[in-house]
Amino acid sequence: MKSHFLASLLFAALAVPAFAAPTAQGFDNETVGAEPKSFAAAVGNWVVVDDTGNKRLSVNGAKWARGQTSAGLADKARALYGERYAEFLDNVQSYAYFPIAVMNDVADFREGTITVRFKGVDGRIDQAAGILFNVQPNGDYLTLRANPLEDNLVLWQYVKGRRSSVKWIRNTPTPSGQWHEMKLTVKGNQVEGWLNGKLALTHELPKPVSGRVGLWSKADSVVYFDDYRVEPASR
């Protein structure tokens, strides 16, 4: 039933119209030591932490071992997507290597901008920080991710249980222990990836995006996130 369980996490709200107002999410009102209320922690260990007096959302892969679904995933899945969850959950074990947290307040992002600040804290294999988007009911998704250990920016796709790179940009340093800003811009089929105010990646997708959004990471990464903001394209 695990596989039938994560799909409910990502598809109860497809009937909800695309959002029309900017949605900003900090973590000042969250509880340190607890999972966030503003994001559904689907895979991996996502917890609110105190960072020099400021509350951040952390993905903590320090105890990572091939990844695991988060506690109470079924309830989170149903809260987001209702009963249409089986197909998504069929893939949950396939992507357990990649922690994801899904934003509760945005049911269908199509065009606009997603911005987040991140800081690589620890991780020997990875310190991956990603913007998750175009999350589909069958578990497919796209993610734009930076990695302080690799100095690159990559647009990944996850299709039918398999991850592959769509566009890979090297020489984009984001040193560990420092805050950086990553921005994703989507207009029609066009995708842009920005780091610290500089355009680093452009790509044309085969079709427009439409789905949920959130945060993404990998393996043993320990990364702090803050100031997640979703802005729809102006009409």
Image (spheres, helix red, strand yellow):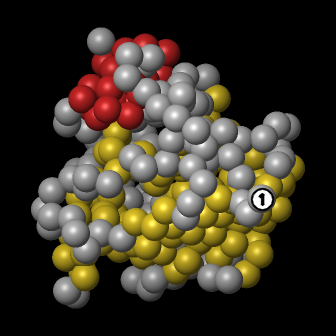
Residue 172 sits in quarter: bottom right
- Would you name the residue on which mark 1 appears? 235
Q: Is residue 120 visible?
A: no
Question: Front-most of 120 and 43?
Answer: 43
Q: Is residue 23 visible?
A: yes
Element on which disc 1 rests? loop
Could you say where residue 93 lies in the image, as x and y percent from the top left?
40, 25
Rendered position, 129 above or below 212: below
Residue at the spot 75% in from the left edge and 46% down from the top edge? 166
Crowd class of label 1 (few under 14; some 14 to 19; many from 20; radius 10 Å)? few
The quarter of the rendered structure image containing the C terminus is: bottom right
Instruction: Answer with left or right where residue 147 lies relative to residue 66.
Output: right
Rendered position, 49 above or below 163: below
Residue at the spot 35% in from the left edge and 40% down from the top edge? 43
Residue 10 sits in quarter: top left
The quarter of the rendered structure image containing the N terminus is: top left
Could you say where residue 115 lies in the image, as x and y percent from the top left?
56, 68
Residue at the spot 65% in from the left edge and 63% down from the top edge? 113
